Image (cartoon, grey):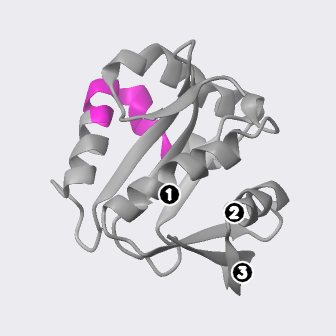
């Protein structure tokens, strides 16, 4: 696999990140278009907000600090994004990640999670909880490949989800 790494969100990746989220638009993925909508409006402010969230600055009430990282290759292309919440959120867990549709199926999901787990330990977590739609077999495999252990299924808004735990 090519040399890929996690990077803290930065305005130097503006062009690449906008191409990354445009891939969701092309594929018709409304969920991630919603997640990244602020990046289209004002990229500099979006990056600032992500980096402030990691420091616990200007968080909405009830939110915990959340560190974001982008999976970047040697060509400086953003391939994926991962969010590590510094505390457990009952439904969402500690970690959420995504890989742009055009880059899926190449092992990047495994790599982004593998690279993020040491950071989760570094911020004091001894385990992380991950949540994925029951129908999302690829994401489930990524979690299992990173030593995830299934611990419960649940329903939200008519959709079924599985939760997994990874001990650090």
SS state under label 3: strand
Relative to 157, does residue 69 appear above or below in the rendering?
A: above
Residue 77: x and y, percent?
56, 19
State which mark lies toward you, 2 or 1.
1
Judge whether residue 154 can be spotted in this image: no
Residue at point 50%, 57% (across, down): 117
Q: Earlier in the sequence, mark 2 or mark 3?
A: 2
Answer left or right for 156 relative to 144: left
SS state under label 1: helix
Report which residue position mark 1 lands on. Answer: 117
Badge 2, how many Cα within 10 Å: few under 14, some, many 20+? many
State which mark lies toward you, 1 or 3.
1
Magenta-tinted stretch: 35-47
Residue 86: x and y, percent?
33, 66
Q: Nearer the viewer, residue 162 or 111?
A: 111
Q: Magenta region, mostly helix, strand or loop?
A: helix
SS state under label 2: helix
Residue at point 51%, 32% (across, down): 5
How far, Cα to Cα, is label 1 from label 3? 17 Å
Residue at point 71%, 77% (across, down): 162
Q: Are marks 1 and 3 in contact (CB under 8 Å)?
A: no
Q: Are marks 2 and 3 in contact (CB under 8 Å)?
A: no
Report which residue position mark 3 lands on. Answer: 150
Q: Which label is found at residue 143?
A: 2
Residue found farthest to the left: 57
Answer left or right for 53 relative to 82: left
Residue 15: x and y, percent?
47, 14
Q: Earlier in the sequence, mark 2 or mark 1?
A: 1
């Amino acid at each position: 696999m090519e040399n890929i790494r996690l990077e803290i969100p930065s305005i130097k990746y503006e062009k690449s990140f906008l191409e990354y989220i445009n891939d969701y638009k092309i594929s018709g993925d409304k969920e991630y278009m919603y997640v990244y909508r602020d990046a289209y409006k004002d990229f500099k402010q979006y990056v600032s907000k992500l980096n402030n969230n990691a420091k616990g600055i200007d968080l909405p009430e009830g939110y915990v600090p959340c560190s974001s990282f982008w999976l970047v290759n040697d060509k400086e292309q953003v391939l994926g994004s991962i969010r590590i919440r510094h505390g457990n959120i009952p439904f969402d867990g500690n970690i959420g990640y995504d890989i742009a549709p055009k880059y899926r199926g190449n092992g990047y999901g495994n790599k982004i999670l593998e690279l993020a787990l040491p950071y989760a330990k570094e911020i004091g977590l001894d385990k992380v909880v991950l949540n994925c739609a029951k129908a999302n077999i690829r994401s489930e495999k990524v979690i299992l490949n990173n030593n995830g252990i299934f611990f419960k299924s649940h329903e939200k808004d008519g959709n079924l989800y599985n939760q997994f735990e990874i001990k650090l």
